[in-house]
Amino acid sequence: MTSLKIESLTLSIADKLLCRDLSLKISANECWGLLGRNGVGKTSLIHSIIGIRTIDSGKVLLDSQNISELSRREVAKKIGVLFQDSIETLSATVLETIMLGRHPHVQSRIKDNLDDYALVDSVISELSLSELSDRQLSSLSGGERQRVAIATLLAQTPNIFLLDEPSNHLDIAFQISVLDTIKSKLYERPASILMATHDINLAARFCDYFVLLLENGGHLQGSKKEVLTAENLSKAYGCKIQSIQTKENTLYYPV
């Protein structure tokens, strides 16, 4: 089972401290939410985990190996990243784009190629993209492109999903169905998820554990019950936040 471990990570950008001494282990079958106000460092933390942003100190271990010592292909076989607007500039069809998700696994044998196409067809169906498979990305709406980006990630079959604002451009129905699809992979593979989002209620619906980034490099982490309190959220977002308990969920709102 693939595990991701962060040890004493400190990260800053242009003399602004974003994260100080963060240690975190994400194990199989766990779904973590990454919360915090704009500019606090959620995206930068995801980038630092996969090595595309330099950290000040600490290390990131993928199955006990320092991720900085692994090749991009080795990392991509285990970690899949949904970047914000990651496919905006591609000139390709929906099918061609989703096939790119298989790149870390590409082999020369014909059988593997057929298996890749079968997997991609399955993902296209899961994300309700069958009618769009021959369309150019440039002809799609923002929500449709976001579903293509997520389908490309699913085609990659990673063991760890790093999601940066996965609900971008999606209507409410697709927000729920797409995240349901991703979370179902936790137990099929098994896999794990770290999801950065501005939507506290969406995160509370899907995530069991949280990292809440604070100003000046501080952070809180733990179970949903431990982290998602009105006091903690009010401190993190700089406004008063209250909660209400419904039959199914706890909902959070500003006052």
Image (cartoon, rainbow, N blue to C red):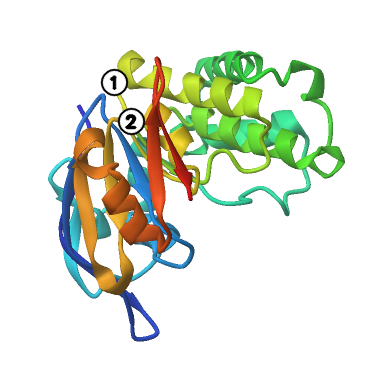
- Single out the residue that lies furthest toward the right: 139
- Single out the residue that lies furthest toward the front: 255
Q: Which residue is drawn at 57% across and 20% down?
A: 177
Disc marking residue 159? 2
In the image, taking residue 150 as reference, residue 148 lies left or right, namely right
In the image, taking residue 210 as reference, residue 21 lies left or right, namely left
Q: Is mark 1 on a helix, strand or loop?
A: loop
Can residue 69 be seen in this snapshot? yes
In the foreground, 174 or 235: 235
Could you tell which of marks 1 and 2 lies nearer the N-terminus? 2
In the image, taking residue 35 as reference, residue 144 lies left or right, namely right
Report if the CB atoms under discs 1 and 2 are less than 8 Å apart: yes
- Single out the residue that lies furthest toward the bottom: 15
- Measured from the top left, where is residue 51 in percent x and y? 34, 60
- Measured from the top left, where is residue 7 in percent x and y? 13, 57
- Measured from the top left, where is residue 81 in percent x and y? 45, 44
Amino acid type, label 2: Asn
In the foreground, 252 or 195: 252
Above-or-below relation of 102 to 75: above
Mark 2: few, some, or many residues within 10 Å (few <14, many ≥20)? many
> The N terminus appears in which quarter of the rendering?
top left
Amino acid type, label 1: Pro
- Residue at mark 1: 190
Above-or-below relation of 151 to 211: above
Could you give the CA–CA distance between mark 1 and mark 2, rounded to whole angstroms? 7 Å
Above-or-below relation of 113 to 69: above
Q: Residue at x 29, y 42 (%)?
A: 228
In the foreground, 145 or 1: 145
